[in-house]
Amino acid sequence: MKHRLTLAAYPQGLPGPEHFHLDSQPIPEPADGQVLLRTLYLSVDPYQRNLMAPVGPGYAPPVPLGGVMVGGTVSRVVASRHAGFRPGELVLANAGWQDYSLSDGSDLLALGDVKQPSHALGGLGMPGFTAYVGLLDIGQPKPGETVVVAAATGAVGSVVGQLAKLKGARVVGIAGGADKCRHAVEVLGFDACLDRREPELARRLAEACPQGIDVYFENVGGDVLAAVLPLLNLNARMPVCGFISHYNDAAPVPGPDLASVLAKRIRVQGFIILDHYGERFDAFRRDMGAWLAEGRITLREDIVDGLEQAPAALARLLQGGNFGKTVVRVSES
């Protein structure tokens, strides 16, 4: 039987198991031009919360009630009636929260012989690509500059900091907890990392950035952004890929004063990584694959077992309870 998680209700605030429905269906058979996939790993990412509403964020359609929850997957081809794929192949897919799915092949990327398939959902996949494009194309760090990144040990932030170090920048991370901050410095190579849960973040950040901030990679918002803004230097750059601290807000909340963005000629650029696959993904896979093989990039995963655990994993991620890239192991490889 095929198992899947569908969206049962639109959440107000933090999503939980009650907003999903787990059902079973017969495993489908592929038609001409289709492949049958079995999900090995399922990606859990902050953007999924934005799609759990009647009106989507604009860059992707919302998940309809009764629809399978969206998500990237590493899947194995079980059966194929498609000339481009053979049984046994590993592919990067968009199968969503289900253990079997059909595809016409248009959304599949063959992974070949990979050492750790789940990395295709993290550092070698969308989160790593987000860090690569956001930091290198928009942030453009220079040797000696100060780069600050929040959610510093998450799937995106951990790669941002390591890339900034490769470019010769001084890197200050912000993370939730002493263990995460220690990991950022001792394992990922950050110059400093501040626990956002400790008091006086603004004062501590100013002390950690005596020369101001040249690049702030924004993926959190809220109090972290408020602490960063006064420290941004003239002509600072701020790539913006998200604001997870507000994803579960039931109503809009007042934001920090952005007057300094104008006065300091700060470049703030929001970006949706879907726009960049055509022109930059090949370069990213080449560069990131080499850096990972050389040991210059370290990846950490937060693996959860069982499709039925995906809702809890998403809720934990949105509350900052993950440590590394959150991945659900749906079936054994």
Image (cartoon, rainbow, N blue to C red):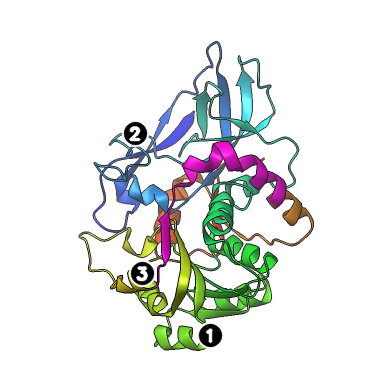
The dominant secondary structure in magenta is helix
Q: Label 2 to label 1, Cα distance in Å?
A: 46 Å
- What is the x, y in percent for residue 229? 39, 75
Q: Amino acid at mark 2?
A: Gly
| Range of magenta residues | 264-287
Q: Which residue is mark 3?
A: 261
- The quadrant holding residue 46 is bottom left
Q: Which residue is mark 1?
A: 208
Asked if residue 298 can be seen in this view, the reply is yes
First reached walking from the N terminus: tag 2 or tag 1: 2
Q: Residues within 10 Å of mark 1 (few under 14, many from 20)?
A: many
Q: Secondary structure at mark 3?
A: helix
First reached walking from the N terminus: tag 1 or tag 3: 1
- What is the x, y in percent for residue 95? 49, 34
What quarter of the picture does the C terminus occupy? top right
What residue is shown at x 27% (from left), y 45% (from top)?
53
Asked if residue 236 lies left or right of residue 289, the reply is: left
Q: Is 280 covered by the magenta stretch?
A: yes
- What is the x, y in percent for residue 290? 76, 51
Q: Label 2 to label 3, Cα distance in Å?
A: 41 Å
Dots 2 and 3: beta carbons under 8 Å? no
Q: Which residue is mark 2?
A: 67
Q: Which of the two discs, 1 and 3, sits closer to the camera? A: 3
First reached walking from the N terminus: tag 2 or tag 3: 2
Asked if residue 144 lies left or right of residue 56, the reply is: right
